[in-house]
């Protein structure tokens, strides 16, 4: 008779999952900081190209023996649409980063899970109760506090970032659909490949020859994105989503640190207040979803 595993192993897995998620958020925010540095000198299209080109290059090397099998998908159209949504999200977010402080942009992106909940009714045919709707409205209020319609901060750059939050929500919803048919690595490979192909076709029209030192930043951009995605997948593999997903909000900590160290930026009181509202509403919505369907895992 096989003895059950010790109870401490579950706790250990949870801790490892949390550490992987914290690492993923640290890497993703580092990628955004690299992008913000590069777009001060190079076109946004070229920076987006580097993010996907070097990402897919890393995947091609790591997954070389399995590439042919991983490219098989049961839902090619949805894979292409999802990949284009992620590419659009990256383009909008990097465009906003040209003018918006890193912490402010990251705070606005926190609204993405709120948008997912709002779109769950028409797209996923999910039932959203009044309490979850209250969480959605609170999240919208938090975003409004950060953007402050009518203020000087309410500029086109802010709308770029808000648009990125919306397209990223659609990207997350399409990921839910694909999680039922395709392996995670297949979806990850398509995301990087389509972005690399599309941007490689247009980047020659915007190309600015990088300085030798800047090539390292371009490569680092793709490296951080690739390892960040691996860390996120690893986190959701070793621990339940209910344990690790709330730690995605740690990106505000990293964004504030990166912004202060690299760009001498600090979020103002309105950004902090709005981020607190969005994080609180997001955690509340996540809590409600777990109570209604505790077996659901994020993909």
Image (tube, helix red, strand yellow):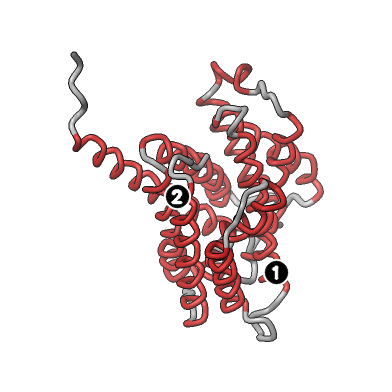
**Residue for badge 1:** 159
Give coordinates of residue 35: x percent, y percent. 58, 56
* 282 sits left or right of 201 in the view: left
Residue 74, above or below 232: above
Crowd band around label 2 with a 10 angstrom C-alpha radius: few (<14), some (14–19), many (20+): some
On residue 290, which mark appears?
2
Residue at x-position 20% and y-position 36%? 7
Q: Viewer-nearest of labels 1 and 2?
A: 2
Give coordinates of residue 28: x percent, y percent. 49, 51
* 31 sits left or right of 155 in the view: left
Element assignment for label 1: helix
Crowd band around label 1 with a 10 angstrom C-alpha radius: few (<14), some (14–19), many (20+): some
On residue 263, which mark appears?
none
What distance separates the C-alpha of mark 1 from that of mark 2? 31 Å
Query: Viewer-proximal residue, 107 or 181?
Result: 181
Residue located farthest toward the top when viewing the structure as drawn: 1
Residue 196, above or below 154: above
Query: Viewer-proximal residue, 145 or 63?
Result: 145
């Amino acid at each position: 008779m096989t003895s059950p595993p010790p109870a401490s192993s579950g706790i250990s897995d949870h801790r490892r999952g949390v550490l992987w998620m914290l690492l993923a958020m640290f890497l993703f925010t580092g990628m955004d900081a690299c992008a913000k540095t590069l777009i001060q000198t190079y076109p946004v299209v070229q920076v987006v190209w580097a993010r996907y080109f070097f990402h897919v290059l890393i995947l091609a090397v790591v997954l070389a023996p399995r590439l042919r099998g991983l490219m098989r998908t049961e839902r090619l159209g949805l894979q292409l649409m999802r990949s284009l949504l992620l590419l659009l999200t990256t383009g909008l977010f990097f465009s906003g980063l040209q003018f918006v402080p890193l912490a402010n942009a990251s705070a606005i992106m926190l609204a993405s899970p709120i948008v997912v909940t709002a779109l769950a009714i028409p797209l996923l045919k999910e039932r959203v109760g009044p309490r979850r709707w209250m969480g959605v409205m609170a999240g919208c209020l938090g975003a409004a506090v950060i953007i402050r319609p009518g203020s000087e901060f309410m500029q086109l750059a802010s709308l770029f970032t808000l648009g990125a939050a919306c397209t990223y929500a659609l990207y997350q919803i399409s990921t839910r659909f694909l999680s039922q048919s395709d392996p995670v690595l297949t979806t990850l490979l398509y995301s990087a490949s389509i972005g690399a192909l599309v941007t490689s076709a247009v980047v020659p029209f915007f190309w600015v020859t990088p300085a030798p030192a800047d090539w390292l930043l371009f490569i680092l951009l793709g490296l951080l994105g690739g390892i960040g995605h691996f860390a996120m997948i690893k986190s959701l593999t070793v621990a339940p989503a209910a344990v690790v997903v709330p730690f995605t909000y740690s990106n505000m900590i990293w964004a504030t640190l990166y912004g202060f160290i690299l760009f001498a930026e600090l979020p103002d009181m309105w950004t902090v207040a709005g981020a607190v509202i969005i994080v609180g509403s997001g955690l509340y919505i996540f809590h409600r979803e777990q109570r209604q369907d505790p077996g659901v895992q994020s993909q």
